[in-house]
Image (tube, grey):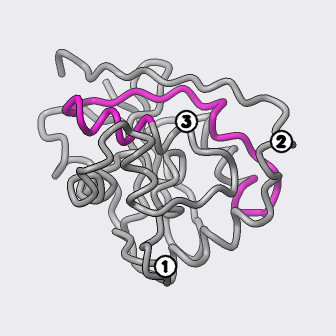
Amino acid sequence: MIIYDTMPFLQRQLTVFKQADAVVFVSLAADGVQEFEAEYPGFALQPGHVPELAVFKRYAAGEVVDFHAIKVHYLKATPFQLAVWTALHEMAPTETLTYQALAARAKRPTAVRAVATAVGKNPLTIINACHRILPKGGGIGKYEYGPVIKQALLALDLKQPRSSQVISGESKTENHPAQSK
């Protein structure tokens, strides 16, 4: 069973999905449940309390948060996607990278376009900071939820401490997709 909870977020809606003790999906879509079901058909969903929503509320308010403290799990992923999403998850607060630099971190330095595709399929937006991947040629680039929300997230990130100031930074990531629904 996957539970989900929704809150207003940056003049949008944020929906967080959780299975057991790990967050498995984050949506900024107008209908997060519809987005989840399109990506992961067949999973049983139930509205409920997701305590991790409090971290997003503090983040939206401009408070210092540590997304590494949230335990995450991937419902489905290829080994390549896992490498890219893990590299995203391990980025320091406020750090930005180009797609090329992310490809190198994911140990796939020649697969820049494939890395960009994996970034676009990231199921844990904000937690895995795909909004902080920027094009080599400048600008803010693309974002599934649009450039306005990407710019707003980048502005919120500027309120976060630099990586040397993070107090609790141990990553809690499960890199194995669920075997059953």
Q: Which label belongs to residue 50?
A: 3
Q: Name the foreground residue: 178 vs 135.
A: 135
Q: Position of residue 153 (x, y in %)?
A: 60, 68
Quote the CA–CA distance across marks 3 and 1.
31 Å
Tag 1, which secondary structure?
Answer: loop
Tag 2, which secondary structure?
Answer: helix
The amino acid type of the residue labelled 3 equals Val
- Characterize the local packing of mark 2: few (<14), some (14-19) or many (20 or more) Cα atoms within 10 angstroms: few
For the C terminus, the image quarter is top left
Q: Position of residue 161 (x, y in %)?
A: 82, 52
- The residue drawn where x is 34% and y is 68% is 144
Quote the CA–CA distance across marks 2 and 3.
29 Å
Residue 152 among magenta residues: no
Earlier in the chain: of badge 3 and badge 1, it is 3
Q: Name the foreground residue: 121 vs 4.
A: 121
- The residue to which callout 2 is attached is 164
- The residue to which callout 1 is attached is 140
- The residue drawn where x is 29% and y is 59% is 116
Q: Are marks 1 and 2 in contact (CB under 8 Å)?
A: no
Residue 65 among magenta residues: yes
- Callout in the foreground (3, 1): 1
- Callout in the foreground (2, 3): 2
Residue stretch in magenta: 58-86
Tag 3, which secondary structure?
Answer: loop
Q: Name the foreground residue: 121 vs 18.
A: 121
